[in-house]
Image (tube, coloured by chain):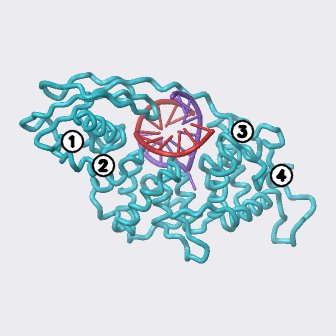
Chain colours: A cyan, B red, C purple
DNA sequence: GAACCGTGGTC
DNA sequence: TGACCAAGGTT
């Protein structure tokens, strides 16, 4: 039986259209969701009014390629500090970037702020349709569909990595990614219900996060196991089929700790590129694609202060640290003296936060 | 399409 | 322990 085909024998009271296998999938999943939905801070609780679009949007952007566990504290901090989208829009760039520090993929923070300003200047209300949402900065196909469905009840087809995995298994789609995305999206469209599309999307994601995970399918507790083609084949974890990963090259670079009377010299990285727009230690120009030059920003009596290793998406960086503590004038170029005692408030991304930690640990 | 962009949890 | 992976978007 193909997806979407009418079930031969109607097992429920007649509706305006035939009951299909797709309807059964949605109904079974929603029933499971009603019992097993995770209690997450950005979700409306039963009995609550409709979810706040600002909180839905903020959570969805934070959750892009990021785990629920990592997002929770950032979501609490952002919503506490900026309760409405107009508050976030009015914040300073450096405040928003610093508040995002540690969460990664910093282009999200820039786009988040740009989106908040766009919404605020348009009256402070988020658009309600998928197409209008898609036009906002930082909102791609997934996030626009998720907000339309979850915050506004639109029937939108929400496809993230969880949905991709669950759908690929349900229908044993064995085309390798990314080519499989065409068939996966079509199948997701067929099983997405007209009503409760937002709950359906969140149910698929909860299922993918807690039951049908990448490493383990846990079919014994899956509400969709009876109709799952991958389970019938006996190899659910084999779906979706993924291409081989490329190895990450090892890169070397240097970073420089320049200190003067209890303050350290920090720079702000260019808006584009790795760690774009974030405060940082001066470095020797390393990138994900090539080693640094090894050259310090000026001639001085540089002393080695250890190194830190840090994995990025495309490279594994070993950053050696060099210190000057008797600097007198300002180093060349733009920068600011930041009190060492308050280095934790500088909003350094994790790489440089660890570098600072290493330098300060070595001074004791 | 494919490259680029972070980080922390998990096993 | 290191390899894999996560509620993707932009260029």
Q: Are marks 1 and 3 in contact (CB under 8 Å)?
A: no
What residue is rendered at 78% in x and 61% in y? A23
Q: Above or below — where is A154 with respect to C1?
A: below
What residue is rendered at 83% in x and 64% in y? A19
Relative side of A131 to A290, left or right: right
- Chain assignment, label 3: A
Relative side of A34 to A141, left or right: right
Q: Which of the 4 quarters of the picture holds residue A279?
A: top left
Q: Secondary structure at mark 3?
A: helix
| Numbered circle sitting on residue A266 | 1
Picture coordinates of residue A296, whole percent (x, y): 19, 26
| Numbered circle sitting on residue A237 | 3
| Closer to the eye: label 4 or 2 | 2
**Reading the chain from its start, which is encountered first: label 1 or label 2?**
1
| CA separation in Å, label 3 and label 2 | 39 Å
Picture coordinates of residue A127, whole percent (x, y): 48, 66
| CA separation in Å, label 3 and label 4 | 16 Å
> Residue extending furthest front?
A364
């Amino acid at each position: 039986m193909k997806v979407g085909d009418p079930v031969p024998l109607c097992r429920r009271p007649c509706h305006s259209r035939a009951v299909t296998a797709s309807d059964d999938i949605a109904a079974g999943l929603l029933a499971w969701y009603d019992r097993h939905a995770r209690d997450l801070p950005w979700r409306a609780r039963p009995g609550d009014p409709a979810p706040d679009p600002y909180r839905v949007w903020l959570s969805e952007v934070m959750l892009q390629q990021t785990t629920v566990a990592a997002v929770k504290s950032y979501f609490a901090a952002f919503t506490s500090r900026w309760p409405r989208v107009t508050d976030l829009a009015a914040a300073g760039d450096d405040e928003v970037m610093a508040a995002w520090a540690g969460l990664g993929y910093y282009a999200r923070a820039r786009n988040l702020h740009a989106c908040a300003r766009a919404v605020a200047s348009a009256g402070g209300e988020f658009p309600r349709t998928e197409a209008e949402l898609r036009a906002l900065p930082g909102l791609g196909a997934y996030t626009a569909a998720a907000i339309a469905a979850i915050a506004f009840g639109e029937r939108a087809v929400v496809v993230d990595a969880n949905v991709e995995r669950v759908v690929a298994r349900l229908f044993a789609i064995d085309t390798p990614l990314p080519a499989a995305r065409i068939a996966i999206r079509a199948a997701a469209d067929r099983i997405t219900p007209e009503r409760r599309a937002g709950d359906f999307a969140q149910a698929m994601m909860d299922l993918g996060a807690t039951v049908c995970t990448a490493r383990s399918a846990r079919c014994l507790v899956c509400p969709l196991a009876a109709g799952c083609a991958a389970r019938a084949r006996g190899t659910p974890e084999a779906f979706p089929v993924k291409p081989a990963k490329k190895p990450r090259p090892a890169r070397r670079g240097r970073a420089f700790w320049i200190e003067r009377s209890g303050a350290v010299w920090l720079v702000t990285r260019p808006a584009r590129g790795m760690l774009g727009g974030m405060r940082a230690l001066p470095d020797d120009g390393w990138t994900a694609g090539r080693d640094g030059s090894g050259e310090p920003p000026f001639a001085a009596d540089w002393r080695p202060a250890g190194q830190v290793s840090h994995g990025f998406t495309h490279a594994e960086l070993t950053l050696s640290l060099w210190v000057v503590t008797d600097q007198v004038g300002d180093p060349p170029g733009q920068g600011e003296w930041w009190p060492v005692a308050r280095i934790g408030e500088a909003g350094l991304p994790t790489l440089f936060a660890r570098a600072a930690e290493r330098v300060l640990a070595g001074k004791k």
